[in-house]
Amino acid sequence: MNFLALTPRASYALLACVALLIVLMYWLKARPLRVKVASNRTWRTLARSRQPVVDRWRWWLSLLLALATGLSIALALTRPQAPALGGIAGRVVLVMDNAPSMFARGQDGISRWDHALERASRIVSSSGLGGQVMVLDTLGRSDTPEWVAPETALAKLRRLAPGTAGIARMPILPNGEHIEAYLVTDGVAQLDVPAGMAVESVFVPADNVAITAFDAKPSLRDPMHYQALIQVFNASLRQQRVRLELTGADQFSVERDLDIPAGTIVNQTVDVTDYPVGVLRAEVRASADGFGLDNVAYAVVAPHHARRVLLVTAGNRYLEHSLGRLPGIALSVVKPSQYRVSSDYDATVFDRFAPAEAPAQGALLFRPPPATWLPAFGRTTTNPVITRWHASHALAANVPWRSVHIERATLANLATDDTQTDVVLASGTGEAVLIAAGGKASRWIAVGFALDDSNFAMQSGFPVFLGSALSWLTEGAETLSRGLGYVEIALAGAKVTGPDGDAVAAVSTHGATIFDAARPGVFTAANDTRAIRVVANITDPQFSDLNRSRFGGASGAMAPTVSLARFNFEPWVLLLLFAVVLLALEWLAYVRHRTV
């Protein structure tokens, strides 16, 4: 027998002391009370005429009842653990599926996670008082795996919760004999369940309507015309009437009612040209929805008015013609001698010229002369070959750089700080920067060659480059689209704020910042030189398909939990109840003169 409150030696010593104390109390006799009487002749006569009745059995019965009562109470204080009373003590591995689908609520209004906690608590409680439990989860968010007592395991379960992002995986299970493993899951996550592992299903069908895609883009024909593209998914097992609502600043609002059959995805296009600029919020509502995490999504509408662009050149008909043909551009042209700093423009294009000070607005420069606010483009080379480019940067996308031939260019050294991005690199006397981008107070793009020194202006990708460059210069903070979970951005030492303006915990690494986007929204990461907006949305329809469970054919029936214990309460409770019964018996025997 094991004891939980005391060591075995201390427990046995306590029981021995209690038994000895009770026996001594019964052996000790009170001194007889002496009373003087006139004569004892009457008592002697009575003693000779009547023999005393032997009633030692009453004494022994009293002693046994007292011993049993006292030892039961003392034994309860030691909290014994015995297979015959408290269950079979063993090791139990409990794996909790805490994928986001466990947030889903059935028609009873109770989430699958609450069902899972109730099921897991029963498994832990039935593991035996001396048993050990290891609590694991499929997203790896629980504490360090270790064997703990059932009470500690229950506390760990109360601290555990489903995650809002991540891929659920079966954790590594410990090896050994007399280990029983249980998985509590709704069956939505595709887990590789080992052979011999007991699976406890908490799947119940749940209604869900979701936004699985949302973006705002200008029309390809008219950049001044903006459209919002929304994808709505009815993941329920029945048809739903869904209210779709788009809202923005200055009381902007658009609503639509949709009738969506079960398991169907519909696409909606909404004209948001009247929304000038800013964050746009989309939300879906339904009368029955048991999962609210995917009901909201966000997009950013960039400025879509005609952009005022100033071209500063001594004469370049290719560049002037290409800029003038871009949609949504109002172009003005001046000579370098006529250039004056002005805030009347959204961007400035410099052709083989650079002012002494950086302009207040974004600037695109072709083979600029040396300037203090630009990188040192000073290494002149002939026939450089473009070697590689920053494929994820907006300036390098959709341009066939290998078709661009350059006769002469000035190259710069590779960037050594976070304020400059090496967009395109070339090899001359050695690999160096051909096109760089950066900015502090305003953005700039420096191209190390003139259009007259290359065939770039004749390439089909040249208008694409000009359009991307002007968009990048005028859009303000760079905007990235990401899913929920941990987000890494190439911005060192940045402070991150959430959709509500509150600070978000972030970790800075070498040249990057990492933070957790736990819910949909627009996050802003900024340091002293640069700001990046991150739009975090749920973009995977499988995330919202809550009824795609391996237990879907069971109609929500839950498998019975295997009980490891023979009783549902601990042995010390039985001992206290036994002591109460003994006290009642002793009182009854004393009243009936069966004990002394």
Image: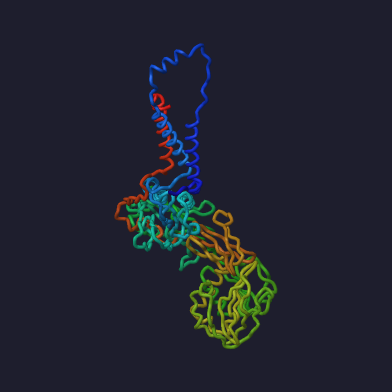
**Relative image position of residue 566 (x, y in whole percent):** 35, 46
Quadrant for residue 334, please give it.
bottom right
Query: Considering depth in this image, is 212 or 226 the residue closer to the camera?
Result: 212
Tell me how many marks there are.
0
Q: Left or right of 513: which side holds 284?
A: left
Position of 462 relative to 502 (above/below): below
At x 48% / y 52%, what residue is drawn?
Answer: 156
Most extreme residue toward the top, as rendered? 38
Does residue 37 appear anywhere in the picture? yes
**Spot occupied by residue 101 in the image (x, y as percentages of width and height):** 41, 55
Work out whether residue 112 can be spotted. no
Q: Nearer the viewer, residue 151 or 417?
A: 151
Question: Residue drawn at (56%, 76%), measured in percent from left and top?
Answer: 423
Name the quarter where the C terminus is drawn. Answer: top left
Would residue 342 be found to the left or right of residue 177 on screen? right
Q: Is residue 330 above or below residue 21?
A: below
